[in-house]
Amino acid sequence: MGARGTAVLSPRALNRALLDRQLLLGRTVLDVVAATEHVLGLNAQDPDLPYLALWNRLTSFAIEDLTAAIESGALVRSTMMRATQHLMSAADFRLVRPVLAPLLRRVQRNAFGSRTAGVDLDELVADARELLTGGSVLGRPDLGRALARTRPGADANALGWTVQYLLPVVHPAPSGTWGKRGATPFAAWPGVPGEATAEETRELVRRYLAAFGPATVADARSWSGASGLREIFEQLRPELRTYTDEAGRELFDLAGRELPPPDLPVPVRLLPEFDATLLAHADRTRVMTEEIRREICQGAAVAATVLVDGTVAASWTRDRTGALTVLPLRPISTADREAIEAEALRLLAFAAPGLDHTVHFGS
């Protein structure tokens, strides 16, 4: 117990809680929309990443399951947490996007403020919304050029990016589906408020804790990129349970949420790049050591990782020939290598059917 009788959670206890909430203790039976809502969104900076994330979490998952949900609009891809591309349910997009509006305005100002100096941004957004009405879809370069026609001398590229940050646009299929890369298309998404209410922000914090808790205020800020969350946590304090970690930091969680045993065995998993399991906390020691974090997270890149006993033990890459290479970041036992190889072969059968599959371990 902590100084005030608050339970102290070890990194291992926090690890098992995170794996439980991210559906990584064992594959489960959920449809793709329910699963995406359960984990509160999937990173989609590359179109294949959400597919690999769900393959790790769901039984009987097929590529066409997720593609159909994207094509129907049940799941939408847009600029979201930390101003990066994510896939979320349409309902969660309407909840989360307004909470992130101040962050996205700040990102636009920092990245493109000087290149849009003199441009009336409210007018720009209104013009972009009109161009995208009636189901119109325009690529970001085309939209930027269209907006620049009535703004002589304006930077068309900066205008297109500005709209991406300031207007709740989505990137409709086939963009964001398996293997589909290229110019980013924009489509308007109606019914998304420009600003969040206090209750919507509180609900997002509840949802964050359901997906990633127990967690600190700094963890929620790191996951979302949003500021001003300490006040929201204080508003929610009467309905939340608190713990401390071994460093004495206060952790919040939903009341009544049971934590799995810290010694619970967990399966090997091969997570894709940017998986939220690695990015949802300011303190990432629940999933990897600081030394390994420096190997995995370099600049804006976050490598694909192998979890052994719930924590990062290696990175992995896959080439077009059907070969998967594992690069150990700590000693791995023979039994764990066999488990990694078996899981890697299952991943290759899913992602690259019809090829000869091989798994290699680097030094």
Image: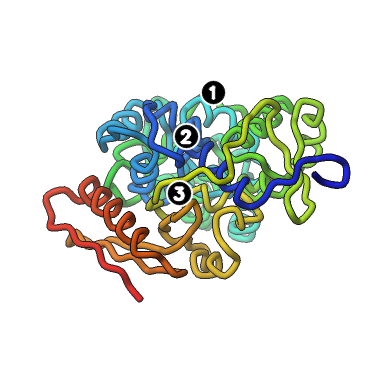
Residue at 47% in and 29% down: 189
Residue at 60% in and 58% down: 111
Of callouts 2 and 3, which one flags the residue occurring earlier in the amino acid sequence? 2
Secondary element type, mark 1: loop
Residue at 40% in and 47% down: 267
- Relative depth, front residue between 78 and 301: 301
Residue 181 visible from this viewpoint? yes
| Pointer 1 residue | 191
Secondary element type, mark 2: strand
Q: Which residue of the protein is positioned furthest toward the right in this rendering?
A: 4
| Pointer 2 residue | 88
Q: Position of residue 217 (x, y in %)?
A: 73, 45
- Relative depth, front residue between 118 and 133: 133
Q: Is residue 313 above or below residue 73?
A: below
Residue type, mark 1 in image: Gly
Residue 227 visible from this viewpoint? no
| Pointer 3 residue | 144
